[in-house]
Image (cartoon, rainbow, N blue to C red):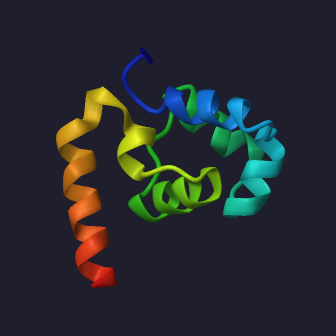
Amino acid sequence: MHKSGFGSIGHIRRKRGITQQALADMVGVTREHLSAIENNRETPSVSLLERIASVLGVTVAELIGEAGTEQAAALERGRQERTA
């Protein structure tokens, strides 16, 4: 179980063998910004969450974790409606 917030991004990233710098480059942010998100010092935009999820091969809901289950479900519904 992960702490609330966005710590699961770092966990998933490490499981995939991706460095912070590599993920930051792939999603168009600085390594420092990504580190701040992973350590819950900054909150990512929805579009950044979607880019991170896409690169890591997970859903936005998985990135948010149980602390944001309702928010994640709403984000996923909105994403699905936009692609339908």
| Left or right placement of residue 43 versus residue 76 in this view | right
Residue 81 in which image quadrant: bottom left
Q: Position of residue 62 (x, y in %)?
A: 41, 40
Up the image or down, 32 lies above or below 79; here it is above
Q: Position of residue 79 (x, y in %)?
A: 31, 70
Residue at the spot x=28%, y=59% of the render?
76
Q: Position of residue 18 (x, y in %)?
A: 79, 41
Residue at the spot x=70%, y=30% of the render?
15
Q: Nearer the viewer, residue 51 or 37?
A: 51
Residue extending furthest toward the bottom:
84
Up the image or down, 76 lies above or below 1; here it is below
| Left or right placement of residue 76 versus residue 4 in this view | left
Q: Position of residue 5 (x, y in %)?
A: 40, 29
Up the image or down, 70 lies above or below 8; here it is below
Q: Quadrant of the N terminus?
A: top left
Q: Quadrant of the C terminus?
A: bottom left
Up the image or down, 26 lies above or below 42; here it is below
Number of numbered discs on residues: 0
| Left or right placement of residue 53 versus residue 33 in this view | left
Residue at the spot x=65%, y=44% of the render?
33
Q: Nearer the viewer, residue 33 or 72?
A: 72
